[in-house]
Image: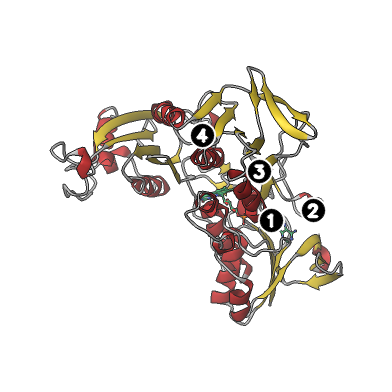
């Protein structure tokens, strides 16, 4: 069999590894239109802050390594169109300008997404950047040490915007984060958490400019100089747009079915509307465990799981994607948070009636002093009021308690209830936690209200 995989990021990588594992004799052609294979945007903050020194190390596969495994790797080669009836793709080699057709038996697409540009006047000015991929990483790194850049305005206070804000605040710049919603990180955390984080950002010199919409960018000599919102004007030597992504699928117009956002429509086998073409990653939706419906949750974790499932089905198995809950985590200066599933704030977006309990506790028993690693922990558990089914949770502390959220993600996946969690067997050791896990405590409170 000849399998063509398009895109060398998380989804494409996993598809290739699965084919190597299950069909070592298959011919694999792996295409990346950029010059660099498998850059890891998730690791970009560590590079920009100088924790990781070499931009070229922020990856998980090399051409040499994959070629040694027998994969035919093509970088700077773009798959520009698909002739599905002929089972062939058209490839442009950007290094040489050559073009050719390649046949396939199975085609796995992981073309991903690109940062969305805000459609306002002035968005073509110089020094308006994005934070995704190796090329932007290199430009952003240069900006962190550029003495002419003092005022940095970030558009969008999702996790990428907050990562960017932290990078540039640590680099000594004045940072403003403009966000349409009334809170930072609103899709990830409810206000009990974001109120604390907004204070933390301010303490570190970042201005959260929430509840505002960008109206235009103003420039001087072709370069960004000011960002004008419906509430204020902010000086800017650099703007970073991190207000969502756009699926990289225009080249598939008329080939596979796409939705109104340009996302490739796939079933739970990652199959597209066209036989023997599969799609995964940020260019697709996933099955959302709390509701059973579809959702667009652009995470590497999802792309990786989808890549595995797509390859297995492409090779003749019959396996479905395990529904996910959008579990994610982030550190914001001294705080570390994680969340999964539905929040009080997002419940109505999903058409779900939800109830929540919020618990503030200590990481370890009260007799353990702070300087020995004790600290407050905040936890919120969200559930269906009629039957106690677990729908989501959020956790935050200066200690790293984020992994608790994986337990909740599994509870959602298995349709567990708060009654199931109330007395679930979680360990206790005073060096590590409290006699009752914070999940037990919250679930016991929640279970009291359910008949
Ligand atoms: P993408 O990563 O979008 O890559 C698609 C690739 O395909 C690109 O390299 C592109 O050049 C190539 N391509 C596209 N079309 C063609 C074509 N026609 N021919 C050839 N090549 C093509 N997720 C997490 O789970 N955890 C994190 O901590 C996290 N942190 C992040 C931090 C940042 C700053 C960013 C930007 C994202 C982060 N993500 C994180 C999200 C994660 O990076 C994405 O969900 C993931 O990269 C999606 O993978 P993908 O395979 O769908 O495609």
Q: Residues within 10 Å of mark 4 (few under 14, many from 20)?
A: some
Mark 1 residue's CB less than 8 Å from ligand 1: yes
- Sequence-wise first label, 1 or 2: 1
Distance between mark 1 and mark 3 Cα atoms: 18 Å
Measuring 55% from the left and 63% from the top, which residue is drawn there? 57
User: Disc 2 vs disc 3: which is toward the camera?
Assistant: 3
Residue 407 percent across, percent down from the top left: 35, 48
* Residue at the front extreme of this rendering: 147
Does 63 sit above or below residue 416? below
Residue occupied by mark 3? 130
Residue 186 percent across, percent down from the top left: 50, 31
- Sequence-wise first label, 1 or 3: 1
Measuring 85% from the left and 71% from the top, which residue is drawn there? 100
Residue 176 percent across, percent down from the top left: 57, 29
User: Disc 1 vs disc 3: which is toward the camera?
Assistant: 3
Residue occupied by mark 2? 251
User: Disc 4 vs disc 3: which is toward the camera?
Assistant: 3
The residue closer to the viewer here, 377 or 290, is: 377
The residue closer to the viewer here, 135 or 27, is: 135
- Sequence-wise first label, 4 or 3: 3
Numbered circle sitting on residue 111: 1
- Sequence-wise first label, 1 or 4: 1
Asked if the residue at tag 3 contacts the one at tag 2, i.e. Cβ–Cβ closer than 8 Å, the answer is no
Mark 2 residue's CB less than 8 Å from ligand 1: yes
User: Looking at the figure, which quarter contains the C terminus?
Assistant: top left
């Amino acid at each position: 069999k000849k399998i063509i995989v398009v895109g060398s990021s998380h989804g494409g990588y996993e598809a290739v590894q699965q084919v190597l594992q299950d069909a070592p004799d298959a011919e694999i052609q792996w295409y990346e239109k950029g010059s660099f294979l498998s850059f890891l945007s998730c690791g970009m903050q560590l590079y920009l802050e100088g924790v990781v020194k070499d931009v070229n190390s922020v990856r998980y596969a090399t051409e040499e390594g994959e070629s040694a495994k027998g994969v035919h790797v093509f970088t700077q080669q773009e798959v520009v169109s698909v002739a599905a009836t002929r089972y062939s793709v058209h490839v442009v080699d950007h290094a040489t300008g050559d073009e050719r057709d390649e046949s396939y038996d199975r085609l796995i697409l992981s073309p991903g997404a690109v940062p969305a540009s805000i459609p306002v006047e002035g968005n073509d000015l110089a020094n308006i950047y994005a934070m995704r991929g190796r090329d932007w990483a290199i430009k952003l790194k240069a900006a962190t040490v550029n003495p002419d850049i003092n005022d940095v305005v970030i558009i969008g206070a999702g996790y990428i915007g907050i990562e960017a804000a932290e990078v540039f605040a640590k680099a000594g710049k004045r940072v403003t984060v403009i966000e349409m919603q009334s809170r930072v990180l609103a899709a990830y955390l409810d206000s009990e958490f974001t109120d604390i984080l907004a204070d933390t950002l301010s303490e570190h010199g970042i201005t959260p400019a929430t509840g505002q919409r960008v109206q235009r960018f103003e420039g001087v000599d072709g370069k960004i100089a000011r960002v004008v919102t419906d509430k204020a004007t902010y000086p800017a030597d650099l703007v970073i747009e991190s207000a969502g992504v756009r699926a990289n699928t225009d080249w598939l117009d008329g080939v596979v079915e796409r939705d109104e956002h340009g996302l490739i429509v796939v079933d739970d086998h990652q199959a597209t509307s066209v036989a023997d073409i599969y799609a995964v990653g940020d260019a697709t939706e996933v099955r959302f465990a709390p509701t059973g419906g579809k959702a667009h949750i652009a995470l590497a974790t999802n792309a990786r799981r989808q890549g595995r499932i797509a390859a297995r089905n492409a090779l003749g198995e019959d396996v479905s994607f395990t529904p996910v809950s959008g579990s994610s985590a982030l550190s914001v200066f001294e705080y570390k948070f994680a969340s999964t599933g539905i929040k009080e704030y997002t419940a109505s977006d999903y058409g779900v009636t939800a109830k929540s309990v919020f618990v503030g506790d200590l990481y370890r028993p009260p007799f353990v002093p702070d300087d020995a690693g004790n600290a407050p922990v905040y936890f919120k558990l969200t559930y269906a009021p009629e039957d106690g089914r677990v729908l989501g949770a959020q956790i935050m502390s200066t200690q790293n308690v984020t992994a608790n959220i994986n337990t909740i993600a599994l509870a959602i996946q298995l349709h567990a209830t708060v009654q199931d969690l109330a007395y679930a067997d979680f360990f206790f050791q005073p060096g590590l936690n409290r006699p009752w896990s914070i999940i037990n405590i919250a679930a016991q409170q929640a279970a009291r209200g359910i008949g």
